[in-house]
Image: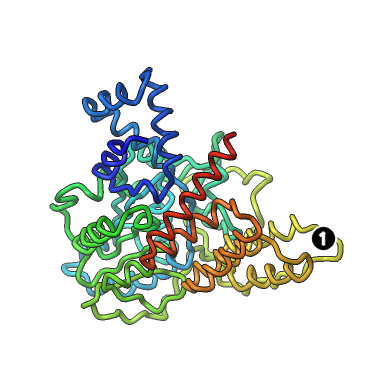
């Protein structure tokens, strides 16, 4: 791939091409060339130079959103708790301000709204702004219609309270939709949101890992500018060390990945009212919803004791145990997921899939060295395991081992090429 395309993506969205693999970007370029009938890269480059719309179309082809509602559920519990502490100190009774960027197809900002509503916040007490560089995903977010893949884990009570069943899946009720203001914006654009008041909470998760070090520093400076001096920043698990190295301080709220500016005083976290992501009390219905389809999973109330997952029954196949591990992990039930992993290893011996899940669970818990060890075990058994390569590369990059991260990314890219053949 010609380096001019890399430079353009770096200038437009700050993307370090090696973080996603050149194969993905080359594929996006080929798709756009076919879409507009270009016969070669030189001809396509001329189209890019002369068309802001085509530049945006290439960005759309490269940016592949992967998100779901209440991803990292502990962070939304932490948000509600911190919001209750913050609310009495807001000047002149102004609403609490929350920012989500990049917001992708809307699952994160809508989760923020649902978490605050379900924890007892009146709609007038907060507002949520959401930005993304992709017009395509913003349009999807505004439509607020979601399929099965946007709902993961077992605690889906929020779906019954805040969604209606429609032909294409589930549509959000107006009470949630109208609380999010979606806007097109580029985090690297000069003066982004310069006219806006500071935000009390900023969500910017799983974005920094796609940038090189100078761009990471630039983005963190922008995020701190957008935050109130007493604000808090929520990031992804693999980005925690990057934010710490930048001088921000982690709050002692396990698996929430929330940070304060280095000079900010840590807020006192109140114990009451005790917010939850999905409380048992139903919200007032906006309209009568149809019964959920047959594939809806059993619901569990967060405040109730979690059931103990039984040991696998004799003769139970390994695939069913792996499904159990995935279900527990995606529901945030990390201790039970780890126990299920240990049971699987005891019954079936070393497994790349199980080592990968253990790596993810350690990664989410901030246990970076343990996560690296498990990812390496995964790759010993399955050298082309794409997800393990990507996560291990992110951990190495966060620790400053850029050469090691690049080697892993090159391995992942070779794996994609081999698969295509």
Q: Residue at the spot x=22%, y=28% of the render?
A: 49
Asked if 98 appears above or below 133 in the picture, the reply is below
Q: Position of residue 414 (x, y in %)?
A: 52, 44
Find numbered disc 1 in the image and state the secondary structure of the residue it sits on. Answer: loop
Q: Position of residue 34 (x, y in %)?
A: 42, 22
Q: Is residue 163 left or right of residue 300?
A: left
Asked if 157 appears above or below 290 in the picture, the reply is below
Residue at far right of view: 315
Q: Nearer the viewer, residue 190 or 110?
A: 190
Q: Residue at the spot x=59%, y=53% of the render?
A: 385
Which quadrant is home to the C terminus?
A: top right
Q: Residues within 10 Å of mark 1 (few under 14, many from 20)?
A: few
Q: Nearer the viewer, residue 95 or 383?
A: 383
Q: Quadrant of residue 313?
A: bottom right
Asked if 393 appears above or below 271 in the picture, the reply is above
Q: Residue at the spot x=38%, y=58% of the render?
A: 205
Q: Is residue 386 left or right of residue 180?
A: right
Which quadrant is home to the N terminus?
A: top left
Q: Position of residue 308 (x, y in %)?
A: 70, 73
Indicate the colouring scheme.
rainbow
Q: Nearer the viewer, residue 127 or 30?
A: 30
Q: Nearer the viewer, residue 361 or 8?
A: 8
Q: Residue at the spot x=54%, y=39% of the render?
A: 417
The residue that disc 1 covers is 316
Q: Is residue 419 left or right of residue 255?
A: right
Q: Position of residue 216 (x, y in %)?
A: 28, 59
């Amino acid at each position: 791939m010609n380096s001019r395309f890399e430079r353009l993506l770096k200038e437009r969205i700050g993307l370090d091409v090696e973080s996603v693999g050149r194969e993905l970007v080359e594929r996006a370029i080929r798709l756009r060339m076919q879409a507009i009938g270009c016969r070669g890269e030189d001809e396509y480059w001329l189209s890019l130079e002369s068309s802001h719309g085509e530049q945006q179309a290439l960005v759309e082809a490269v940016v592949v959103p992967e998100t779901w509602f209440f991803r990292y559920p502990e962070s939304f519990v932490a948000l509600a708790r911190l919001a209750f502490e913050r609310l009495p100190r807001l000047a002149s009774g102004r609403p609490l301000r929350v920012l989500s960027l990049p917001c992708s197809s809307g699952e994160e900002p809508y989760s923020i709204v649902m978490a605050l509503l379900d924890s007892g916040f009146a709609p007038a007490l907060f507002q949520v702004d959401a930005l993304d560089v992709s017009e395509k995903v913003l349009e999807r977010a505004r439509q607020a219609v979601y399929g099965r893949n946007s709902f993961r884990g077992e605690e889906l009570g929020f779906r019954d309270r805040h969604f209606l069943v429609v032909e294409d899946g589930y549509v959000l009720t107006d009470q949630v939709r109208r609380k999010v203001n979606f806007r097109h914006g580029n985090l690297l654009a000069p003066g982004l949101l310069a006219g806006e008041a500071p935000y009390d909470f900023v969500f910017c998760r799983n974005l920094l890992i796609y940038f090189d070090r100078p761009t990471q520093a630039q983005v963190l400076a922008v995020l701190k500018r957008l935050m109130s001096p007493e604000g808090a920043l929520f990031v992804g698990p693999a980005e925690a060390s990057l934010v710490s190295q930048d001088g921000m301080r982690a709050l002692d709220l396990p698996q929430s990945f929330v940070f304060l500016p280095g000079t900010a005083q840590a807020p006192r976290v109140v114990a009451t009212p005790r917010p939850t992501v999905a409380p048992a009390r139903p919200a007032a219905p906006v309209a009568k919803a149809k019964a959920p389809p047959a594939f809806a999973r059993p619901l569990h109330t967060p405040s109730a004791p979690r059931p103990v997952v039984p040991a696998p029954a004799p003769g139970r196949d390994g695939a069913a145990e792996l499904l159990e591990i995935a279900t527990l992990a995606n529901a945030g039930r990390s201790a039970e997921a780890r126990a299920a992993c240990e049971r699987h290893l005891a019954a079936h011996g070393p497994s790349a899939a199980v080592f990968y899940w253990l790596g993810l669970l350690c990664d989410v818990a901030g246990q970076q060295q343990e996560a690296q060890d498990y990812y390496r075990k995964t790759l010993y058994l399955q050298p082309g395991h794409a997800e393990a390569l990507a996560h291990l590369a992110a951990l190495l990059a966060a620790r400053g081992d850029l050469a090691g991260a690049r080697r892993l990314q090159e391995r992942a890219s070779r794996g994609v090429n081999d698969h295509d053949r």
